Amino acid sequence: MKEPQWRAERKLAGGGPLIEIGIYPVQAACMAAGGAAPVAVAARERPKQRPEFFRDVEEAIDWTMEFADGARGDFSTSYNDNLNKFRAEAANGWIELNPAYSYAGLKAVTQAGPLNLAVPPSQQAVQMDDFARCVRDDLPTRVPGEMGRRDMVIIEAIYASAAQGGKRVEIAV
């Protein structure tokens, strides 16, 4: 963001990089946790490098999510940093996506080596086709409203923690 735009206005965007692109690591973490939602978060907004530009939204925010099984993840989203990586580690191995959230060129590697990902030319087209098929054939969607609600509860808890100086906020989804 080199010049002012709607993304830097809470009234128009709803928030900063957390609300815009933070959804991707939130969803990736929940998927890596087997679809589980976190039970708590702790977050801190980073000091603003351009406070005159980001008057009422965060410029960058870091947060931790805790899951019921003891798993935890550390995340960042920023309008300044090029953050496009996801890594999950477990007792029997790890997986890393880098880039993780781009529309094309996704790459995954595990402790056993690279994975071949079948990435469609347009992820949005696949999602829109799914929505249309669900309406036409009366089928449930892969991304139900409950998932969106869950994600917004998590994002709101992250904002609440940041507003309280990083205090741990429990989540009941």
Image (cartoon, grey):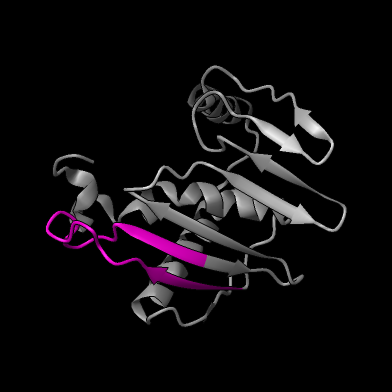
The correct choice, above or below, for 107 with respect to 15 in the image is above
Question: Any magenta on residue 51?
Answer: yes
Query: Of 103 and 88, which appears nearest the observer?
Result: 88
Q: Position of residue 90 (x, y in %)?
A: 80, 56
Q: Position of residue 157 (x, y in %)?
A: 46, 71
Splitting the image into 4 quarters, where does residue 117 fall? top right
Determine if the magenta segment contains residue 81: no
Question: From the viewer's perspective, is residue 8 above or below residue 47?
Answer: above
Image quarter where the C terminus lies is bottom right
Quick check: can you spot residue 60? yes
- In the image, 8: left or right of 159? left
Name the foreground residue: 28 vs 126: 28
Query: Start and end of the magenta stretch?
Result: 40-63
Q: Indicate left or right for 55 with 134 as reference.
A: left
Q: Is residue 60 left or right of residue 83?
A: left
Residue at the image point whose x is 42% and y is 53% from the top: 77
Image coords of residue 35 (percent x, y):
70, 54
**Which residue is nearer to you in this view: 128 or 84?**
84
Q: Residue at x 26, y 50 (%)?
A: 13
What residue is rendered at 16% in x and 42% in y? 5
Residue at (63%, 54%) from the top-left corner? 29
Please tell me whether residue 121 is drawn above or below residue 55 in the rendered image.
above
Q: Quadrant of residue 2?
A: top left
Q: Is residue 145 visible?
A: no
